Image (cartoon, helix red, strand yellow):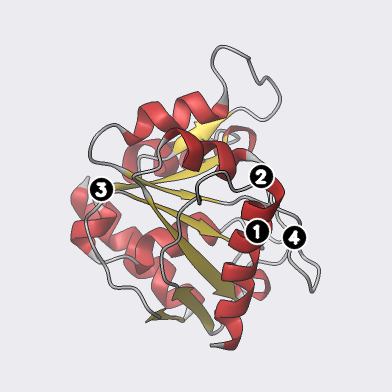
Amino acid sequence: MELTAMALALVARLLSGASVRWVGCEPDTCQRVYFANHTSHLDALVVWSALPPPVRSLTRPVAAKDYWEKTRLRRYISTKVFDALLIDRNEIKVHNSPIDLMIKALGDTKSLIVFPEGHRNTGPEMGEFKSGLYYLAKKRPDLELVPVHIDNLNRVLPRGEFLPVPLLSCISFGPPLWLEVKEPKMDFLNRARDAVRTLKER
């Protein structure tokens, strides 16, 4: 399984032509939540593959269950290869919410990759962040929240296309942030969104 994961990470890096930048942040195996803009179905795979192997082995992407369980191959890749936490966007239960599932998946050692916009955004501007990142930070204030900007990946796998188009993209990891004491939800979400957006310009 490890060999499959390494091969898949290599293919993802080759197809995306992704260069990786760490800006004010270094790779670390401490518990983190990597939160990124969302432009392509390849986002989770490419961010995951951009992490060094020791960090990658502790990091689980959070992905949409309806997309990644659609075919046998997707289900295999998501659950058996990169151990994704699949969220059912159609049947959210109060006593088993996505936040509860993420807290459980984190445990004491794991990190997560999340996409706070919720859905892919193909427009020029990032969408507003949904509240999940705020509640995650509130329940686990010890976690480092690391912004990630994905540039140009929407052109590698455009909406409606099946086969990726090899292009150059860039994955930028920024300085961690935390929820401040008594920080209002919208202030925090706007600050987190700005942290991702400004990475493109740094």
For the residues labelled 1 and 3, the Cα–Cα distance comes to 29 Å
For the residues labelled 3 and 2, the Cα–Cα distance comes to 28 Å
Q: Which mark is residue 121?
A: 4
Give the quarter of the figure containing the N terminus: top left
Q: Residue at x 67, y 75 (%)?
A: 155
Q: Which residue is mark 2?
A: 185
- Nearer the N terminus, badge 2 or badge 4? 4
Residue 53 visible in the snapshot: yes
Residue at the extreme bottom: 202
For the residues labelled 1 and 4, the Cα–Cα distance comes to 18 Å
Residue type of the residue flagged with mark 2 = Lys
Q: Residue at x 55, y 71 (%)?
A: 149
**What secondary structure is found at the residue carrying circle 2?**
helix
Q: Which mark is residue 126?
A: none
Q: Is residue 30 above or below residue 89?
A: below
Q: Which residue is mark 1?
A: 162
For the residues labelled 2 and 4, the Cα–Cα distance comes to 22 Å
- Nearer the N terminus, badge 1 or badge 4? 4
- Nearer the N terminus, badge 4 or badge 3? 3
- Nearer the N terminus, badge 1 or badge 2? 1
Toward the viewer: 161 or 194? Answer: 194
